[in-house]
Image (spheres, rainbow, N blue to C red):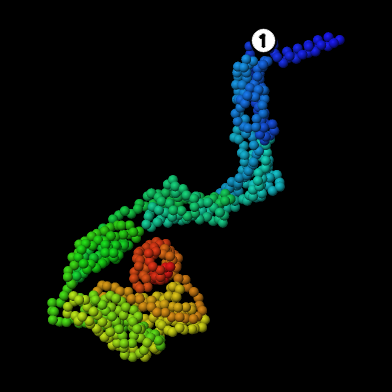
């Protein structure tokens, strides 16, 4: 019994060994069939949207002991990988030789993350919602299901909704591999109207090839401005500067809102060549009768020109009192050098009298016929003194009076003094000169006395200066300058320009100043005289802005005011004709001079000291003055 059982077990083990080791059958196979084995590689994800992939090698015409070996040295018909990429497997025969090699690429598979974009149209009713990811162009890989609020509104393979109803949208997307996901919600409203776009531009006065653009759009949304200048240049901003070569261009502005609404406009623009012409300038000499002064004038045909002489003077005509070489340079309003000239000047010795026995007369003093009255307080009177030619340039001089206080003095010929007198009656003013040592024929010290009377009746005049005064709210006080002639400028204590003219009506409490500008013309020399005094009023009233005036039909203002040095003149309208701009200090000295045709003109006054200044504007048959404070 035991022996048959043992034989049976050996028989079973031999059959199992033959089944696992097909060596004998291989010999038989090769003997009867010459077709070699082949191999094909495939992959599949363990589950949808998984990162685990099963790689499988299928062997055809396989015989015993042919094995599959992968690139990571793993032996077997299949392996598991977790990374996308390229994988290689080889098929080896029983002797270990490679009979076939194959490569397979495993693409990555990730969870879907759908999203929705709103594409606005410039045409109302043509907006579109687009879902992502999109369908491939040659196959159908995704299924889309659209929801508005909580309701399903569309389903299928099309990733867009055209002209949808307003509402809150989301989309469900499922891939062919089984991956799926929902997008975030988006709020959609229809485009109701088109976006109106416009722009303006201004060519820079001093550089005709530099243009300033300003864009506008009729929307309250945040917008993006995109400029295409037609010369290959593009910029993004509402206000931009752009340089052009000379030529003609089509400038396009495109405006896009945050909601996708767009609008655009195109305008032609012609850029001129920069002016490179030269102004022909000649210096003309005109000596006076004695020949001791030669007037030099820079002659050209330009109305708007600036002149800079080697002597430092900046006027078209200067007086040469010494022989030598004189040079003038001429600049345009943009301070570009346009021309120049030079000339040699010969100045003769001053004229002298042939009769040395006659003693020249001393200085002459007379009272200015204009008197400035103070009601019940004091009187201002101006006196002028002249010295005979050619002794005007004295070594020293002085003024005195028996009852007056010296308030102001002009220290050049003709000599001017301003006295104040607080009592009526007879008074005298004396002018004393000390001549230079090399002057003969004159007394070393010469005095001239002028006598005059101040009448009591002056107190009855309607005066421009009064004592501190109180008036009721709503009342008006009229101040008069006494009509002495010249130009009148009234200012309040804060520097605000109040009025111009001989009289001013006051309704506001404060300290008021009057500046009277007059020119005395002697021997072609100009002297600016400034007379000022002040008045305190206590009354309630309205205010008026500083630094504004009207020149012709053009309102103009100066800002910022007060300023730290950079001041802008802004005219309400473009200027068809030039306006002369001059800046004076309160001593009447010219500190700045130019002409302009610009609607917005910059004045660089940063080199001037702090204080009050007057901006004089001349043009359109008018002259106006703006007040300015530099601080």
- Secondary structure type for disc 1: helix
Answer with left or right where residue 336 lies relative to residue 175: left
Q: Residue furthest front?
A: 2
The number of numbered discs placed on residues in the rendered structure image is 1
Among the 4 quarters of the image, the one containing residue 442: bottom left
The correct choice, above or below, for 307 with respect to 250 in the image is: below
Among the 4 quarters of the image, the one containing residue 344: bottom left
x and y, in percent, of residue 398 in the image: 28, 80
What residue did someone put label 1 on?
27
Residue at horizontal 18%, vertical 72%?
A: 350
Nearer the observer, 157 or 432: 432
Answer with left or right where residue 508 lies relative to residue 372: right
The correct choice, above or below, for 174 with respect to 401 in the image is: above
Nearer the observer, 116 or 56: 56
Res 617 seen here:
no
x and y, in percent, of residue 329 in the image: 28, 60
Residue at horizontal 49%, vertical 54%?
A: 238
10 Å crowding of disc 1: few (<14), some (14-19), many (20+): few
x and y, in percent, of residue 595 in the image: 35, 64
Q: Residue furthest right?
A: 1
Q: Quadrant of the N terminus?
A: top right
Residue at horizontal 67%, vertical 10%?
A: 27
Residue at horizontal 27%, vertical 63%?
A: 309
Nearer the observer, 139 or 601: 601
x and y, in percent, of residue 10 in the image: 78, 11
Q: Quadrant of the C terminus?
A: bottom left
The correct choice, above or below, for 275 with respect to 617 in the image is: above
Res 363 seen here:
yes
């Amino acid at each position: 019994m035991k022996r048959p059982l043992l034989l049976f077990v050996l028989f079973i083990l031999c059959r199992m060994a033959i089944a696992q080791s097909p060596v004998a059958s291989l010999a038989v196979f090769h003997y009867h069939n010459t077709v070699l084995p082949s191999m094909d590689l495939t992959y599949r994800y363990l589950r949808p949207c998984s990162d685990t992939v099963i790689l499988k090698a299928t062997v055809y015409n396989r015989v015993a002991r042919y094995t599959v070996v992968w690139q990571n040295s793993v032996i077997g018909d299949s392996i598991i990988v977790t990374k996308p990429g390229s994988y290689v497997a080889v098929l080896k025969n029983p002797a270990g030789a490679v009979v076939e090699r194959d490569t397979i690429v495993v693409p990555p598979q990730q969870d879907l993350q759908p999203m929705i974009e709103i594409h606005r149209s410039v045409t109302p009713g043509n907006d579109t919602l687009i879902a992502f990811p999109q369908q491939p162009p040659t196959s159908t890989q995704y299924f889309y299901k659209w929801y508005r609020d909580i309701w399903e509104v569309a389903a299928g393979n099309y990733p867009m909704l055209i002209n949808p109803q307003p509402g809150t949208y989301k989309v469900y997307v499922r891939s062919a591999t089984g991956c799926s996901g929902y997008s975030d919600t988006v709020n959609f409203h229809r485009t109701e109207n088109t976006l109106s776009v416009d722009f303006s531009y201004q060519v820079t006065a001093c550089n005709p090839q530099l243009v300033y653009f300003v864009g506008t759009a009729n929307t309250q949304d945040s917008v993006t401005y995109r400029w295409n200048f037609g010369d290959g240049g593009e910029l993004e901003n509402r206000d931009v500067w752009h340089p052009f070569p000379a030529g003609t261009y089509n400038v396009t502005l495109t405006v896009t809102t945050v909601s996708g609404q767009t609008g655009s406009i195109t305008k032609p623009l012609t850029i001129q060549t920069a002016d490179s012409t030269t102004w022909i300038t000649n210096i003309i000499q005109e000596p006076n009768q004695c020949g001791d002064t030669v007037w030099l004038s820079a002659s050209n045909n330009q109305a708007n020109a600036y002149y800079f002489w080697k002597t430092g003077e900046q006027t078209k005509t200067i007086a040469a009192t010494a022989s030598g070489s004189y040079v003038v340079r001429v600049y345009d309003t943009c301070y570009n050098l346009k021309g120049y000239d030079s000339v040699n000047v010969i100045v003769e010795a001053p004229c002298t009298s042939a009769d040395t026995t006659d003693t020249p007369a001393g200085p002459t003093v007379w009272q200015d016929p204009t008197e400035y009255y103070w009601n019940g307080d004091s009187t201002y009177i101006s006196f002028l003194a002249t010295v005979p030619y050619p002794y005007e340039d004295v070594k020293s001089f002085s003024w005195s009076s028996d009852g007056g206080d010296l308030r102001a003095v002009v220290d050049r010929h003709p000599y001017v003094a301003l006295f104040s007198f607080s009592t009526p009656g007879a008074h005298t003013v004396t002018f004393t000169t000390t001549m230079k040592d090399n002057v003969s024929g004159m007394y070393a010290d010469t005095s001239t006395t002028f006598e005059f009377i101040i009448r009591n009746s002056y107190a009855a005049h309607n005066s421009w200066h009064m004592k501190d005064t109180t008036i009721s709210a709503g009342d008006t006080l009229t101040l008069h300058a006494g009509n002495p002639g010249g130009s009148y400028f009234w200012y309040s204590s804060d520097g605000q320009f109040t009025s111009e003219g001989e009289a001013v009506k006051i309704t506001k409490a404060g300290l008021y100043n009057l500046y009277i500008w007059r020119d005395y013309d002697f021997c072609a020399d100009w002297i600016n005289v400034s007379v000022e005094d002040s008045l305190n009023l206590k009354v309630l009233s309205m205010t008026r802005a500083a630094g504004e005036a009207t020149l012709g039909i053009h309102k103009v203002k100066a800002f910022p005011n007060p300023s730290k040095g950079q001041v802008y003149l802004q005219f309400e309208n473009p200027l068809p004709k030039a306006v002369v701009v001059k800046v004076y200090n309160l001593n009447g000295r010219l500190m700045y001079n130019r002409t302009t045709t610009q609607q917005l003109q910059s004045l660089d006054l940063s080199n001037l000291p702090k204080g009050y200044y007057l901006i004089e504007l001349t043009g359109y048959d008018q002259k106006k003055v703006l007040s300015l404070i530099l601080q």
